Amino acid sequence: MLRRSTATGFPMLLYQMHELGRAWMAPLTYWAEANARMFSARDSWLSAVPGAARLAAGNELLYRIGKDYEKPEFGIHAVKVSGHDVPVVEKVVAEKPFCRLLRFKRYADDVANIKDMKSDPTVLVVAPLSGHHATLLRDTVRTLLPDHKVYVTDWIDARMVPKEQGTFTLDDYVGYIEDFIRLIGAGRLHVVSVCQPTVPVLAAVSLMAARGEATPRSLVMMGGPIDTRESPTAVNNLATQKPLWWFENNVIHTVPANYPGSGRLVYPGFLQHAGFMAMNPERHFQSHWDFYQDLLKGDLEDAEAHRRFYDEYNAVLDMPARYYLDTVRVAFQQHLLPRGLWDVAGERVRPAAIHDTALMTIEGELDDISGEGQTRAAHKLCTGIADADRQHLTVPGAGHYGIFSGRRWREQVYPQVRDFIAAHATPARQEQPALL
């Protein structure tokens, strides 16, 4: 059971104070949004008054700083395959209390002169549960779709999960990944994990291998904290400078009564977001100033790019308290995975048990979240994988997000990921569930 500090009421009330502040800000943000529209709309007489452009730009900036950011949509409705537009439908194929398994189903039956997609490799993209929604991997998914059947873990905001559903731990996370691998069918599956899930994914596959279960054809691990003793970053240092009880007493809060998860203990998304912003405050300030200037100049393309980025970046979720504290302890403070001391539900995690799964690790040269060598450390642990089935890629000039999103991902990283998966795609080794 989590301990809660009773020395002061402030930590206990922080979430409630945050919600009160949001309620107070709401009328101002609505007013600012209305003003921005009135002073910029072509058919509004207010757009002709002196200084209308500055008023519109200033009000939109105020609106975007103060507004609530809801979970975005993936918005992937079609992809290009062999030069043709192929419709894509997002389907929920499995639901658990804290996660939905999504499939992005391609429909090419009515598209002439297109390749046979039935033999395309199947990929499970394990999205991070570290503050942002799975939609942060939109570009990852969109890029994979022309050549693969794609599934994605869509983690649920803990404040939306009723307290009656119980707790969610790092062990539970590992169990979810095992269940999803079995459901899709390990013998035909390739797993791509981005950042935080590299640790539980490696644990899940290790446990399955040790039991003699079928394991995925390949693992692609990108920018993850396999061994945070390698090139520790500011994120790693923060986790080690404070004892676990400090995190428990200072960053764990209770979901207020206005959410379905009322009473649940969580690490709130707004605290994680504040941490994100504090890492590069000058860059975010400059970005917002550039947005204001773009609106004044009428540079609508750059202004829209700013909106898209921050619509995603500012949309955060709450993490279950026990899961968050487990992650801090296991991955960042005690380094149990690389030390060979991690037990999940009573079973020791032994990556050396993996034999039939190829391994690719990817790091960004300038990654300030998972430092160089932290992901590559997986190769030291997975001693049962043949050298011919291993590959490592360090992306020059890439930061954390550049290895799975944007131009570098599409042009430098993805072609190597695609070829690695294709090189290790073989016919299914087991009968597949009829559902999928």
Image (spheres, rainbow, N blue to C red):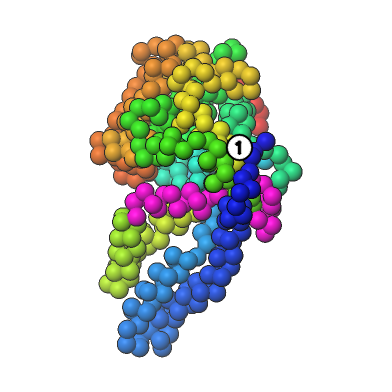
Q: Nearer the viewer, residue 412 or 307?
A: 307
- Place of residue 261 in the rendered image (x, y in percent of width and height, measured from the top left): 68, 50
At 34% from the left and 45% from the top, the residue drawn is 406
| 218 vs 289, nearest the viewer | 289
Q: Is residue 333 magenta?
A: no
Q: Is the residue 273 above or below the residue 403 in the image?
A: below
Residue position for label 1: 322
Quadrant holding the C terminus: top right
Please tell me in which quadrant of the rendered image residue 404 appears.
top left
Residue 374, image x, y percentages: 37, 28
Camera sees residue 79: no
What residue is drawn where x is 44% and y is 66%?
64
User: Residue lying furthest right in this view?
Assistant: 164
Q: Is residue 243 above or below residue 407?
A: above
Question: Where does residue 281 sit, x and y in percent of width and height?
Answer: 34, 55
- Could you tell me if residue 276 is visible in this image? yes
* Residue occupying image coordinates x 43% and y 17%: 381
Amino acid type, label 1: Arg
Relative horizontal placement of residue 373, taking residue 343 as reference (left or right) = left
Quarter of the image with the N terminus is: top right
For residue 157, side relative to residue 60 (left or right): right
Q: In the image, which residues are magenta? A: 256-281
Q: Residue at x 44, y 11 (%)?
A: 384
Outermost residue toward the left?
396
For this rendering, which residue is in front, 86 or 7? 7
Is residue 279 part of the magenta span, yes or no? yes
